Amino acid sequence: MTNSLIEFKNISKEYIVGEVPILALNEVNFIIEEGEFVVILGASGAGKSTILNILGGMDIPTSGKVIVEGKVITEFNEKKLTDFRAKDIGFVFQFYNLIPNLTALENVEFAVEVSKNHLNPKETLKKVGLFDRMNNFPSQLSGGEQQRVAIARAIAKNPLLLLCDEPTGALDYKTGKAVLQLLEDINKETKKCVVLITHNSAIAPMADKVIKVKSGVIEDITINKNKKLIKDIEW
Ligand code: ADP
C-alpha cells in the first residue's frame, strides 16, 4: 500500500470506430501525490484528454485500475461514480462550459448544490476577483472572466481534485497567464491537487510533476525540484 492520492495502474483504453480499434492509452502508469500541481503534456491526439476523463470518472478504461485515496474507482458502480464526479472532482474546460442563462453567482451556486462541505459561492467569486461581476451572465463577461467563473465553480465544490483541460487554450497570452496564476495560487493556498493538460511545453516548469504522453504511452515523468513561478515563465 502506498499513500499516493492517485494511482494509474496499467491503464489501457481502446476506442472502436467502425471496425477499427484505436488504442488511445497503452499501459499507462503514474502516481500523483497529495497537493501536487501536475502537468500532463503532449501533442494533440497523444491521449491527454482520455487520461483526464478517466481520472475524473467520465470515461472508463478498457483495462487497468485507477485508485483515488485508496478507493478503486474503476470498480465503482454507476451511482458511486456519479457521486465521485459530483463531490470529488472539480473540472475546468477549455471553453468554460458555463450555463448561459444563469449569472456567474448562479452558475457557482448550482454547482455546489451536490456538495455537502462546499465553500461559500460569493466568497469564492471574490477569491477569483469577480465579486463585482457576480450578477453578470456569461455573455457579459470576457473569456478570461468566464474562465475565472468556471474555476470558482470548480473549487467552490471543495473537491479532492481540480482537473483542467487546456484551461488557457481559448485565451490570449496575458489572460491565459493570469488564469494559470490563479491556479498556482489555489494550489498553494488550498494544497489541493491540480492536474492540468496542455500541449504547451513552456508551462511545464510551473508543475511539481510533468507527465509526458506520446501516442498513448508515457514518454517521461519528471519531478521539478526547482519549479518556477508562473510570473517568471515566458513563452
Ligand atoms: P489529446 O487530448 O492528447 O489530444 P485524446 O485523449 O483526445 O488526445 O485522444 C487520444 C486518441 O484517442 C486520439 O487518436 C483520438 O482520436 C482517440 N479518441 C479519443 N476519444 C475518442 C472517441 N470517443 N472515439 C474514438 N476515438 C477517440
Image (cartoon, rainbow, N blue to C red):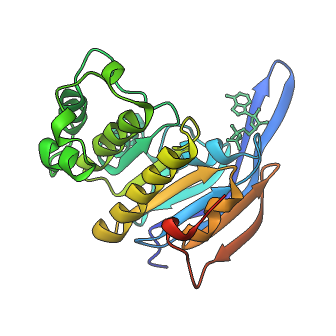
Give the residue displayed 87% in from the left and 26% down from the top. Answer: 20
Q: Name the foreground residue: 10 vs 91.
A: 91
Q: Is residue 25 left or right of residue 33?
A: right
Position of 203 relative to 102 (above/below): below
Percent across and percent down for residue 53 are 55, 42
- Residue placed farthest to the top in the image? 101
- Residue placed farthest to the bottom in the image? 225
In the figure, residue 10 lies in which quadrant? bottom right
In the figure, residue 113 lies in which quadrant? top left
Q: What number of labels is visible?
A: 0
Q: Is residue 15 left or right of residue 52?
A: right
Position of 231 relative to 217 (above/below): below
Q: Name the foreground residue: 114 vs 3.
A: 114
Percent across and percent down for residue 202 are 67, 61
Give the residue displayed 54% in from the left and 56% down from the top. Answer: 66
Position of 28 relative to 164 (above/below): below
Q: Is residue 46 left or right of residue 167?
A: right
Ligand 1 occupies quarter: top right
Percent across and percent down for residue 138 are 33, 23
> Does residue 9 appear anywhere in the picture?
no
> Does residue 200 appear anywhere in the picture?
yes
Q: Name the foreground residue: 215 vs 57.
A: 215
In the figure, residue 228 lies in which quadrant? bottom right
Percent across and percent down for residue 230 are 51, 65
Quadrant where the image shows the C terminus: bottom right
Give the residue displayed 63% in from the left and 57% down from the top. Answer: 40
Give the residue displayed 74% in from the left and 32% down from the top. Answer: 15
Q: Name the foreground residue: 68 vs 120.
A: 120
